[in-house]
Image (cartoon, rainbow, N blue to C red):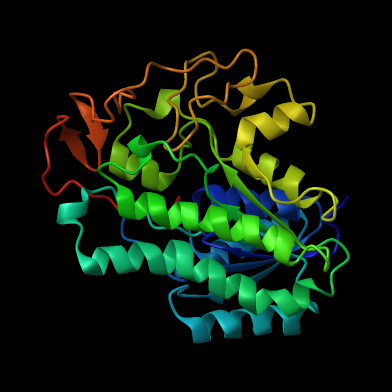
Amino acid sequence: MSLQNKTVFITGASRGIGLAMALRFAADGANVAVAAKSDEAHKFLPGTIHETVKAIEEAGGKGLAIKLDVRNEGDINTAIATTVEHFGGIDILVHNAGAYWLQPTAEFTTKRHDLVFDINERAYFLLAKAAYPHLCKSENPHILGLAPPLDLNPVWFMNSSAYTVSKFAVSLYTLGWSKEWQAEGIAANTIWPRCGIYTPSAELHGGKELVSEFRKPEIMADAAYEIVTSNSREFTGNHCLDDSILYERGCTDLEQYSMVPGSALVEDYMVPQDVSPPPGVKLTPNRLYDFNTGELLAGSKVGLSNKSKLGAGDQSKLESK
């Protein structure tokens, strides 16, 4: 199905994965409401909602810039209403904005906990609730969250329980809505990267040394496009990995997405260990966890600096995912 004249509401699309998604949708002739906080240039990171709208229109779509703090319910309701008034409805809701903060539970402040849950879990709930009556009027409505497959391996919850639970909450909401709104034909799915994705935030926080092991954000954009152009009454309740769904849909040239073609790739966080990558995908050895004990490996990177498996320290980081 084409996205020609369909309206997509996407959060956090001023840079990175969200920007790539917005441009992919625009290439199909979609209307894209770009809802994010970045209405002015960031001190360290490129991109604003206005620059994204310009790029959308250059790509063949129509854009609408909406300054939005997803922690504010009133602002969410206003943003959804503004989109409907401007474009006449909403066909697709994508919650791309996210807070990423890794830190052991005992050191995770309440303020940081609330921020992670407000942006990842609470915003997703409020956005879906506000968009629901408008999605009901669409011919092929979709909700798409950026969240991992549900894998209850305790290793994912060690040293980063708040972040992991906030993201799994998105996966659980999605699973529930796929049944709750099945009669209305509203599809609810998630998308997650198998490997690290290069974004300005990733380079800012992780440095340039891992860039060769990353993929371009376009892989997430193309995977999202495959999902939201599926028949909403047939494809719902799925927790998709980007390269897997692309391979299932006929894309065999996954090397096109590598920052450095031919390089082995670093696996992302919360990817189930029993889900094999498509043929030909090479992964670097795990450098984060001992999957037998769950402990961090010596020299693993969690947050801004190296941390031994018994280390603690204030090594947190916040970025859009």
Q: Position of residue 153 (x, y in %)?
A: 41, 36
Nearest the eye: 294 or 84 = 294
Nearest the eye: 33 or 193 = 193
Q: Position of residue 285 (x, y in %)?
A: 38, 16
Q: Residue at image x 16%, y 33%? A: 307
194 shown above or below 51 = above
- How many marks overall? 0
Q: Position of residue 256 (x, y in %)?
A: 63, 24
Nearest the eye: 128 or 86 = 128
Q: Is residue 236 left or right of residue 174?
A: right
Q: Quadrant of residue 54?
A: bottom right
Q: Position of residue 254 (x, y in %)?
A: 65, 23
Q: Residue at image x 11%, y 36%? A: 311
Q: Residue at image x 40%, y 54%? A: 165
107 shown above or below 278 = below
Whether residue 102 appears in this view of the structure is yes
Q: Quadrant of residue 245?
A: top right
Whether residue 41 appears in this view of the structure is no
Q: Quadrant of residue 308?
A: top left
Q: Is residue 18 left or right of residue 302?
A: right
Q: Residue at image x 73%, y 20%? A: 252
Q: Is residue 231 left or right of residue 159?
A: right
